[in-house]
Image: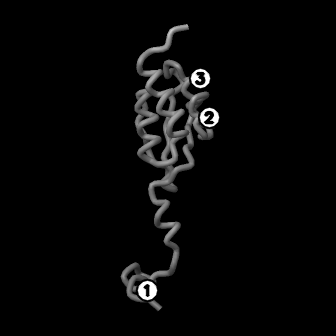
Amino acid sequence: MKITKRQLRRIIKEALTGPPTTVEGWMYWGGEFGLSAEEDNDGQTVFYLSADQPGRAKIAAEAVRAGAQVDTDNDGNDVIYTGVYSNAGEYEEGGVWSDEKDYEAGFKS
């Protein structure tokens, strides 16, 4: 079995850094397979694999190995859920809005 230079680089990178844990890390991961990252309604980074995607099963298996969850949608396409959110910092900050922000947002009391 031959390993391409690209595969060898990815194997070495994963061995040194572990699975992706940031949006940027997952975007790089997806780029290795020619995938474009998207966000779902919650801000989670996801990838879509069409039913006719070449190497679909291999990509899905690699995603699971990297820590993602893979589900099939109603159209038969795979959705890779990375578990990484672009707005994670907002959740970690927590806190409440000021009265001024409430007013600006339309929550007038």
Q: Is residue 95 visible?
A: yes
Where residue 16 sits: x, y (%)?
50, 36
Quick check: can you spot residue 74? no
Q: Residues within 10 Å of mark 3 (few under 14, many from 20)?
A: few
**Relative image position of residue 6 (x, y in whole percent):** 42, 21
Q: Considering the numbered disc 3 on the image, is that residue within a helix, a strand or a loop?
A: helix
Q: Bin the neighbour count of mark 2 within 10 Å (Cα to Cα): few under 14, some 14-19, many 20 and up.
A: some
Q: Quadrant of the image for the N terminus?
A: top right
Query: Nearest the camera: 99 or 3?
Result: 3
Q: Position of residue 30 (x, y in %)?
A: 45, 34
Please identify the residue farthest to the front as the structure is shown: 16
Residue displayed at 51% across by 9% down: 2
Q: Amino acid at mark 2?
A: Val
Question: Toward the viewer: 28 or 74?
Answer: 28
Determine which residue is flagged by label 3: 57
Cα gap from disc 2 to disc 1, whole angstroms: 42 Å
Q: How many marks?
A: 3
Whichever of callouts 3 and 1 sits on the residue coming sooner in the sequence is 3
**Which residue lies under the disc numbered 2?**
64
Name the kind of residue labelled 1 in the image. Answer: Ser
Instruction: Kindly indicate whether the residue at mark 1 contacts the one at mark 2 (C-beta within 8 angstroms).
Output: no
Instruction: In the rendered structure, find residue 98 and report the number of the disc placed on it.
Output: 1
